[in-house]
Image (cartoon, grey):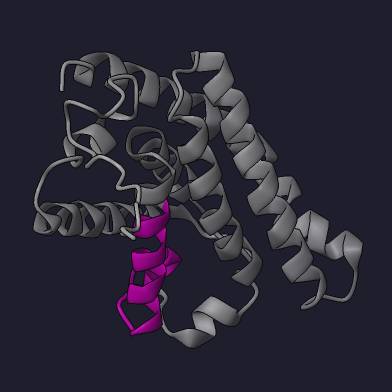
Amino acid sequence: MPVLCYQPPAMTSETFDKRAPPLARLLADRPLILRVGVVLLGSWLLAASSWAQVPMVPVPMTLQTYALFTIAGLAGGRLALEIAIVWLAQAAIGLPVLAGGASGIEALTGPTMGYLAGMLGAASLIGKFAETPRSWWALTLACLGGHALILGLGFAGLVLDSPGFASAFQGGVQPFLIGAVVKSLAAALTVTLAQARLKAI
């Protein structure tokens, strides 16, 4: 007796939702090597954004979240998560891709561990959110939610590494609140303008 198995149709640029993030559409029916190249390029953009920093203790202020949310909005959840994972994998093997050129397992498991974990979650969530057409304000709110996730997990990590809640909040959350709002607005605006330019892809 034959066994019937459902085979989902291959995802191509013709069948892919035209409203999906432009990078996801671009890679829908392209060779794997192109996807690998986009993932590497995205991870290096994250690295470059981490080098633009305002030195602070224990956590420096960088452009990482702006770059991450912009990438997520243009790439979608799965691709954005792949980019973030590869970025952290490069740090793990010793490449200077984190803030201040930091790298190694110590950098991934130190005081900033919670923030880095939050960036993985935020990349996936914001990318998934952007897979359905959204207004600039909706994207801004999503980016604010992403910052809340990152700062929340970062705060939790600092509590384990600091004398108490107050010092963890004052050193690892409070100084970044205004920057979170500015970077959320900027990322949402960048994604909206880029999607308008790339909608024909």
Quadrant including the N terminus: bottom left
Q: Nearer the viewer, residue 104 or 117?
A: 117
The residue drawn where x is 46% and y is 24% is 132
The residue drawn where x is 57% and y is 34% is 143
Residue reaching furthest to the front: 1
Image quadrant where residue 33 sits: bottom left
What is the total number of numbered labels drawn onto the structure image?
0
In the displayed structure image, the side of residue 176 where residue 6 appears, left or right: left
Q: Position of residue 127 (x, y in %)?
A: 45, 39
Q: Position of residue 43 (x, y in %)?
A: 30, 58
- Decide: is 184 above or below 133: below
Image quadrant where residue 91 sits: bottom left
Q: Position of residue 15 (x, y in %)?
A: 23, 28
The residue drawn where x is 42% and y is 20% is 189
In the displayed structure image, the side of residue 17 where residue 114 appears, left or right: right
In the displayed structure image, the side of residue 154 where residue 72 appears, left or right: left
Q: Position of residue 4 (x, y in %)?
A: 34, 52
Q: Nearer the viewer, residue 57 or 39?
A: 39
Quadrant including the C terminus: top left
Q: Nearer the viewer, residue 8 or 129?
A: 8
Tell me the magenta residue range: 81-101
The residue drawn where x is 61% and y is 71% is 113
- Decide: is 124 above or below 113: above
Magenta-span inclusion, residue 96 = yes
- Decide: is 67 above or below 168: above
- Examine the residues drawn in magenta and state their main secondary structure: helix
